[in-house]
Image: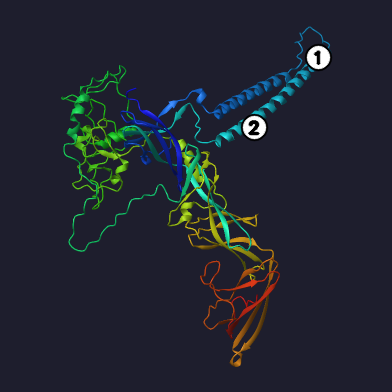
């Protein structure tokens, strides 16, 4: 049929998940029609319009035009998802059972309220004998009936509880469903409207960006005791609610951000000498002359069209006459609101729109969303001058104020502000991909000029809010967003097998790659703080891939040990991962303090601190233990600290290992023990003492 586009179905091939959002690629193929108009269907309705990219993979053709459209159609009852129909039926059943229970409770109340009522006795009539048989019969009837109704009430309450439970389960399943199954009677999606030049079969690749996708790295480390290498499996926890399921796609994970600008910065130059004019930015062009005359023929054709008949029920309008004030209408017009009255007073003096004595004979030009309100008042002060080099506020591309495009609207022609003699565009006005050329159907002051692209009628706010909700999911323990842990670099990890990630907004684990790393098991003890030995796994990243911070599940000899926090590890970097307390290694610390005096007339107090540390190894192999001690730091130049040899300060002091720490490494043989000695001597002049007493721990 002439004028109808050829529809090509597409299939999702690959997805690159960024720090926030994802870039999807689809493939479509077909024979190019004679007019070249092709519609590629299957895109989600959250596809961003500015991210559409199309290229030809095979065939004789080229893409001349590509844009995103968001068609919608009414779905039949058979096309609606089964879970929606199930929810509808369960809600109807719960409402029906609730109504039955309410009516049953009313019947129980009516039966329980039955009481024998004696007839009214006349004045001349004596007392009657009470009909005991009738009263007992009524009581028996009430008891029997209430017993039946109460049994039915118990059964009905049980049915209500079961129906409410089934409804709750169905609602939980509906909340956890894939966002690709949208409820409602309208099917909304997106499609790529293309114009392909060429002939014959063509294969296309359609690329677009979608929000609502996040990922965090996780790891699994398996090693055996005594070995110097281990297997580190890189996994990713991916959550997405993009409106389409990723089934059997090639998945890649990137630390880059989709919203970060990739344009090169422009560095301002500093010149010494005579002041020169600021050069115009690249790509800036003034408005062409005679732009308004370009649409003169189209405007004349529009005026020649017959005007529609006005409605008979239209309100009468007062018309201004030359000799005096406006002629009153047959019926007074409704009084304008205070907001309209204040706006009318702010527009200008008599003769201006909204002023007394001026009544338009035609409806005013509708105001575009991007046109700012520009009230003009006779007594209003002029705006302050803009700084040199700054763009006038609200300016559109081409040297005209934004919303006016160099020519004011016809009703406001006499009150439009004068254009700047040398307009300077701002950064957003030089973003040409985000600008749209207004066509002839726009208002006269917009035709042929560039304006920021208005919001497209794509996905609604509710779907976008649901998609962005994945960014607020609680992270796994020790998890960190990749953009924060990556630091100053960006890296991409490609999964080695096809992945399946449904669009249900929950975390799904995907295996990415297996990386060989170097490991060395060591032990650290700080007996002055705690007499315990802790195992430490030293990881060496010998691959070309950077390892981001995240949780790592450590298993030793096939047995799961614990989940630890892996810090960010650059290629070639070395980091330590704590494995917890090593019960097979024991440590004991013994101290001894001797106080004496020395010097002439015993002018110096000598505090000799001796430390003896015993290490016992019950492991079947030798253990390399790092023993950390500490020495006091003098705050007085007259106080001297003398250390015993054999201990060394840390090579790189940190918050965990300060400069006052002393380290000694020793290898304990299997089943053996080692004894270390150390300590220090504190010499304090007479008349001085350590604040808080001489610490002799």
Q: Secondary structure at mark 1?
A: helix
Task: Inspect this view and state whether residue 23 appears.
Answer: yes
Marking on residue 165: 2
Which residue is rendered at x = 69% and y = 63% of the image?
583
Q: Is residue 417 left or right of residue 596?
A: left
Residue 555 occupies quadrant = bottom right
Residue 450 occupies quadrant = top left
Residue 617 occupies quadrant = bottom right
Label 2, label 1: how far apart the Cα atoms are: 42 Å
Image depth: mark 2 or mark 1 in front: 2
Image position, residue 230 (x, y; %): 58, 58
Crowding near the residue tagged with mark 2, few <14, some 14–19, many ≥20 C-alpha atoms within 10 Å:
some
Total numbered circles: 2
Disc 1: which residue: 137
Q: Secondary structure at mark 2?
A: helix
Of the 4 image quadrants, the one containing the C terminus is: bottom right
Above/below status of 120 relative to 588: above
Above/below status of 242 relative to 253: above
Q: Nearer the viewer, residue 418 or 288?
A: 288
Q: Is residue 421 left or right of residue 28?
A: left
Which residue is rendered at x = 40% and y = 40% of the image?
208
Q: Nearer the viewer, residue 181 or 94?
A: 181
Q: Nearer the viewer, residue 458 or 62?
A: 62
Please tell me which of labels 2 and 1 falls first in the chain: 1
């Amino acid at each position: 049929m002439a004028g109808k586009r050829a529809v090509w179905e597409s299939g999702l091939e690959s997805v690159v998940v960024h720090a926030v959002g994802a870039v999807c690629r689809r493939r479509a193929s077909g024979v190019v029609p004679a007019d070249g108009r092709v519609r590629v269907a299957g895109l989600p309705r959250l596809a961003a319009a500015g991210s559409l990219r199309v290229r030809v993979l095979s065939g004789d053709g080229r893409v001349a035009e590509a844009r995103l459209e968001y068609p919608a159609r009414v779905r039949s009852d058979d096309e609606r998802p089964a879970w929606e129909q199930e929810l509808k039926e369960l809600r109807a059943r719960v409402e029906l059972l609730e109504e039955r229970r309410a009516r049953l409770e009313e019947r129980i109340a009516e039966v329980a309220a039955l009481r024998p009522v004696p007839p009214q006795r006349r004045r001349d009539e004596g007392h009657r004998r009470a009909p005991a048989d009738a009263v007992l019969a009524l009581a028996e009837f009430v008891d029997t009936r209430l017993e039946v109704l109460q049994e039915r009430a118990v059964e009905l309450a049980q049915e209500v509880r079961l129906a409410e439970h089934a409804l709750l389960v169905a609602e939980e399943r509906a909340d956890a469903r894939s966002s690709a199954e949208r409820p409602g009677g309208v099917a909304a999606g997106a499609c790529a409207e293309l114009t392909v030049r060429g002939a014959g079969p063509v294969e296309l690749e359609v690329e677009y960006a979608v929000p609502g996708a996040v990922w965090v790295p996780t790891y699994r480390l398996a090693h055996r005791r005594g070995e110097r290498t281990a297997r580190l499996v890189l996994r990713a926890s991916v959550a997405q609610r993009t409106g389409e399921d990723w089934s059997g796609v090639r998945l890649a994970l990137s630390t880059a951000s989709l919203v970060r600008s990739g344009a090169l910065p422009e560095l301002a130059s500093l010149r010494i000498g005579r002041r020169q004019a600021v050069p115009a930015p690249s790509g800036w062009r003034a408005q062409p002359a005679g732009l308004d005359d370009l649409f003169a023929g189209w405007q004349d054709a529009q005026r020649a069209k017959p005007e529609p008949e006005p409605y008979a029920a239209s309100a009468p309008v007062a018309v201004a006459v030359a000799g005096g004030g406006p002629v009153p209408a047959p019926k007074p017009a409704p009084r304008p609101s205070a907001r309209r009255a204040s706006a009318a007073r702010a527009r200008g003096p008599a003769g201006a729109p909204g002023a007394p004595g001026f009544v338009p004979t035609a409806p005013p030009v509708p105001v575009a969303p991007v046109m700012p309100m520009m009230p003009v008042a006779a007594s209003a002060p002029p705006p302050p001058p803009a700084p040199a080099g700054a763009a006038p506020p609200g300016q559109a591309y081409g040297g005209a104020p934004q919303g006016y495009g160099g020519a004011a609207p016809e009703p406001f022609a006499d009150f439009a502000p004068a254009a700047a003699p040398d307009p300077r565009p701002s950064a957003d006005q030089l973003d040409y991909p985000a600008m749209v050329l207004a066509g002839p159907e726009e208002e006269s002051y917009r035709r042929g000029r560039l304006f920021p692209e208005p919001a497209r009628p794509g996905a609604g706010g509710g779907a976008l809010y649901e998609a962005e909700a994945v960014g607020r999911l609680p992270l796994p323990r020790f998890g960190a967003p990749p953009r924060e842990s990556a630091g100053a670099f960006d890296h991409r990890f490609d999964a080695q097998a096809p992945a399946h990630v449904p669009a249900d907004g929950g975390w799904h684990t995907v295996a990415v790659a297996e990386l060989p790393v170097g490991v060395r098991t060591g032990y650290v003890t700080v007996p002055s703080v705690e007499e315990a030995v802790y195992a430490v796994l030293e990881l060496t990243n010998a691959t070309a891939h950077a390892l981001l911070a995240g949780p790592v599940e450590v298993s030793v000899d096939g047995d799961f040990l614990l989940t630890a926090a892996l810090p960010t590890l650059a290629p070639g970097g070395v980091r330590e991962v704590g494995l917890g307390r090593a019960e097979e290694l024991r440590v004991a610390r013994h101290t001894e303090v001797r106080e004496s005096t020395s010097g002439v007339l015993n002018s110096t107090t000598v505090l000799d601190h001796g430390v003896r540390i015993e290490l016992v190894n019950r492991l079947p192999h030798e253990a390399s233990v790092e023993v950390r001690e500490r020495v006091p730091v003098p705050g007085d130049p007259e106080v001297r600290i003398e250390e015993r040899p054999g201990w060394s300060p840390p090579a790189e002091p940190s918050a965990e290992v300060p400069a006052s720490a002393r380290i000694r490494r020793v290898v304990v043989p299997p089943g053996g023990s080692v004894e270390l000695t150390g300590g220090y001597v504190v010499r304090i002049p007479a008349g001085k003492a350590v604040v808080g007493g001489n610490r002799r721990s």
